[in-house]
Amino acid sequence: MLFRRAFASLVFLLALAPLAGADAGEITPYEYERIRDRIKQGGSAPVSVWLLDPFSIPDATARAAELQARVQRMVAELGSEVLPGGRHINGLGGLMMWVTEPGLEILRTSRLAMNVNYYTEWRYHTLMPQSDGHFDELDRRLRAAPDGKVDVEVTLEVAGGEFDIDRDTGEAFLVLKTPEQHQAAIDAALLLLTRLGVPLSSGLPASTVGGVITVLDVSGVTRNGTLLLRTNERGLAELAWNDWAVAMKAAGYAARTSVAVGSQPYGSLPALGPGQFRAVVSLPYPFINWRGLAYATRVAVNRRLLEDALRPYAFLGTPQWSADFRSATVVLSDAELERLVQTRDLRLGYVVIEKPTNRPTASP
């Protein structure tokens, strides 16, 4: 994910070289047609507009101020042809936004726009995890919704918070216990709502300009650091591109229903006796980008979760834990292995069993 974001920035920088003397927005025929095709599908398209050569202003503070001024001028020039919501400012000099077809033509002739490209869909260029199926489900619901809106549960980045995994759903969630953690969650919620432009003085539901994002419920803020929002594709993009949360989940969606069971060839570990099996048991990936969580805290939480999930089983010998306690290699009997693979405890993500048939045979 980080490589993909860095690569995109590199592409932008390389594109600047031939544009030093450009008098209008540079856009290739291929990019132009991609944007137009997307506009024909839904009336608007996400674009990236390069407004500033980052090498032209070495001082970071001065560069940020100049970029902000150019962003404001660009938005003013587009007027009603740039849609509310779905914006992201790349600190190197780029502005990501949604424009209409007339807006695309304005960009082609604008002296502010150095380079114009089709931008990626809302789910890309984010640090939020996507491997749990929630982003796929949000995409599916977006396409199926008559009004193009979905309900999304947003998990805030709360300083000092820990995480847990629900044994019945396998979903990771934030754990807030102390008054300090509750206050940190409130502060994080207020910061997010301010960034989005949600009026804080009104009651719920409260919406941003143009109704792009509507806040439906804030009762989860001090419970598990969550907000329930209703939004369209542009709102999802604004949240994802700016990484203003650590997770976005499709409200009410059960991503996992069972523990994944697989097999692998024998490694270099000693052979086992008759009726004995070796397996690697792992926690699921937390599906939350825990940016503010110290590594030692993550290890402690992993250990608590995995030890508790494995406590019902009788192992032969002592489990061998990984350094971060996200997995353990265990030896158990046939009967215990059967119990393990049938578990409904979704705090466990994977059980990988060694395959005796794959053990290399000794040379005659």
Image (tube, rainbow, N blue to C red):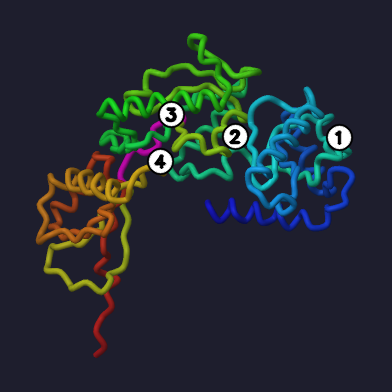
Q: Which residues are magenta?
A: 250-259
Disc 3: which residue: 188
In this figure, what is the number of numbered marks? 4
Asked whether 85 falls inside the magenta stretch, the response is no
Q: Which residue is mark 1?
A: 105
- Residue 35: quarter of image: top right
- Of 164 and 356, which appears nearest the observer? 164
Q: Earlier in the sequence, mark 4 or mark 2?
A: 2
Circle nearer the N terminus (1, 2)? 1
Measuring 53% from the left and 51% from the top, which residue is drawn there?
Answer: 1
Residue with the mark numbered 4: 288
What is the spatial separation of the Cα atoms under label 4 and label 1, in whole angstroms?
40 Å
Residue type at mark 2 is: Ala
**Mark 4 or 3, closer to the camera:** 3
Q: How far is mark 3 from mark 1, CA to CA?
A: 39 Å
Give, as a three-letter code, the residue at label 4.
Ile
Secondary structure, mark 3, is helix
Along the horizontal axis of the image, is 182 left or right of 5?
A: left
Question: Where's residue 39, x and y in %?
Answer: 76, 33
Front residue of this view, candidates 255 and 224:
224
Between discs 3 and 2, the one toward the N terminus: 3
Which amino acid type corresponds to the residue marked 1 in the rendered image?
Glu
Q: Estimate the x, y position of residue 79 in percent, counting from the top left.
A: 79, 24
Tag on residue 237? 2
Distance from label 4 to label 3 (Cα)? 16 Å
Q: Is 254 contained in the magenta span?
A: yes
| Residue for point 60% across, 26% down | 232
Find numbered disc 2 in the image and state the secondary structure of the residue it sits on. helix
Quick check: marks 4 and 2 in contact, CB under 8 Å? Answer: no
Work out how far the residue at label 3 is from the one at label 2, CA to CA, in angstroms: 19 Å
Query: Along the polypeptide, which appears first: circle 4 or circle 3?
Result: 3
In the picture, the disc for residue 224 is: none
